[in-house]
Image (spheres, rainbow, N blue to C red):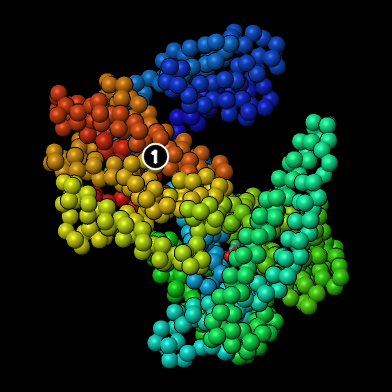
Amino acid sequence: MNILALLKARFQPVLESMSEDVGPLLEMIRPAGDPKFGDYQANFAMGLAKKVGKNPRELASEIVAATQLEDLCESPEVAGPGFINLKLRDDWLQAQLAAAQIDPRVGVEKAAEPKTYIVDYSSPNVAKPMHVGHIRSTVIGDSLCRTLKFLGHTAISDNHLGDWGTQFGMIIYGYKNFIDQEAYKKAPVPELSRIYRVVRGLMDYFDAKSALPKLIEKLAERTAEYETAKNAPETSDKAEAKKQKKEVGRLQSQVKELNEEIKTTKKKIAKTEDSPQLAKLAEEHSGIASAVLQETAKLHSGNDENIALWKEVLPFCEDEIKRVYERLNVTFDHQLGESFYHDRLAAVVEDFEKRGLATESEGATCVFLDGFKAPMIIRKRDGAFLYSTTDLATIAYRMETWKPDAILYVVDFRQGDHFDKLFAATRLWGYTDIELKHVSFGTVMGDDGKPFKTRSGDTVGLDGLLDEAVSRAYKIVQDASAAGGDTLEDAQQKSVAETVGIAALKYGDLSQNRESDYKFSYDKMLALNGNTSTYMQYAYARVQSIFRRGEIDIAALRDSGAKITLEHPAERQLALAILRFSEALDDVLVDYRPNYLTNYLFDQLAKSYSGFFENCPVLKAESDELKNSRLLLCDLTARVIQQGLGLLGIQTVEKM
Ligand code: ARG
């Protein structure tokens, strides 16, 4: 049962008799911002009155009189210029709670019109170690799949691995030049990451070398412009003077930024040149950039040796990411990487050409799209296909295979332009009847406000990140136990710490507005107070401890016919929060935002629960009936927390 949907359904026929376009009117039925105005408010009368030429207050009363509400609401109140205030009846709320009490879905119904979604997420470029950036796509995508499935949709998860790109050219070059066979035989993955890093390091060095003179030149230009702007004769025109000042400021910050960039570029160069060993290596591999491209091209054109090497190392890379997914408790229905589409790419380009949708431009095959400055290139001059070509082939395959209603791409915001073009090209290609959505997300930042890096400036490996979160969680669990919380054996403490630590990372990410950058902080994520998984897990464990202390068989109580009664306002508020779980899940799916669920869990459910807990004794309630009613409210709270966290991919613990 979904209260908001139910209210909308009640008003809908009445509104339809007055207006053609009721969608926006229904959107104006919302939870009340202030309990003074009841539980929900309908604000459509003012706008509608104008259209139909009536007095808004009268119209509101007319609509209320014509709508069947008495079984749900106390008699609705028309307030101010025509607001309709709706207060749900306590007996109706009690009936809904009684139904939720014995419903494994805690009262959440499945979607009336289930759809098929493909969710493309995680999708790392393998052969490089997974890093902090991969956590976002992985946990957001996983949570969306879980939520879609819970609501009765078909969600097909597909990990579109980057298993065919330049990074394999790098690994192959590294393998041919730097591999330590003995180390590789003993432990292939660390040796492969080592050679990847050697090649990456060399390529970065040459990139930095070639970038430096250009940066210096740019700095000189900007500095000159800055000097000129700064020394420009003063003008008496105020607006002009303001503009000048702004320009000086802009140039000054550009100069500052360029200086910073030059500093880091020089540092990168020095790192190699200051080490005789690395300097020698660089000298021997001065052609590495083009050699890597050649190895990649040879792989793509089916060169036996490179294909054999690729087949040899790929399983190791896959095992490596599998280990991370196991720890994160994330699974995929499919893992069709870029390589899977390799021999479909030529046909995609041909099809675009055949339909007259592609144009030859400077030897490359391009798709020109309305509203975009640059075309989408689908075949390079040298005949190579691109990331875009693969994505087009992937869409065609997914359409043929699963006929989805929607494809969601949970990918970094920096690929926004790619997806805008991809979606436009897909429509042009003839796939018009599908929702294509870039579920875009921002960057994980460090304390310094720059992308999160280790002290030495490397990107932070995902494994290390998980280890650190778990070891900090272990400390918290130990402290809690020492401070008189639940008593746990050490082995139990360790397993609770694994659950709590990983949960903190996930929740810390999922509770952010996905489009914003956020600052990574273990302390914040693991805090026992505030909007964290630790707090939510703690709330769950507290409820279980009430049951243990009172020796309550809660499952039996649920089925016993005992009922929840709402007497105290704090009980009513908690009840309403519990029953609004379904609305929160709908909100998540409107624009694919898991933070609507974390907000609900914390701001509505957990806060109402604290209010209840402070005001309403449970085990010491005045009567057995009241005690049972409150135990059942505790139970529903815990079950919604458990289900809600479950949809975020987070487990609860019985004790902590
Ligand atoms: N492998 C890509 C990367 O790491 C992300 C792939 C996203 N999915 C897609 N269908 N393009 O940047």
Identify the amino acid type marked 1: Leu
Q: Residue at x 52, y 11 (%)?
A: 79
| Closest to the observer, 350 or 122 | 122
Position of 451 with respect to 255 (left or right) is left
Residue 236: x and y in percent read 83, 32
- Say which quadrant the N terminus sits in: top left
Residue 204: x and y in percent read 61, 74
Number of marks in the rendered image = 1
Q: Is residue 172 above or below residue 259?
A: below
Q: Which image quadrant for residue 604? A: top left
Please say whether residue 154 is visible from this viewpoint: no
| Closest to the observer, 395 or 386 | 386
Question: In this figure, which residue is indicated by the disc labeled 1?
Answer: 601
Q: In which of the image's four quarters is ligand 1 placed?
A: bottom right
| Closest to the observer, 23 or 263 | 263
Disc 1 is placed on an element classified as helix
Residue 394: x and y in percent read 64, 65
Residue 325: x and y in percent read 43, 65
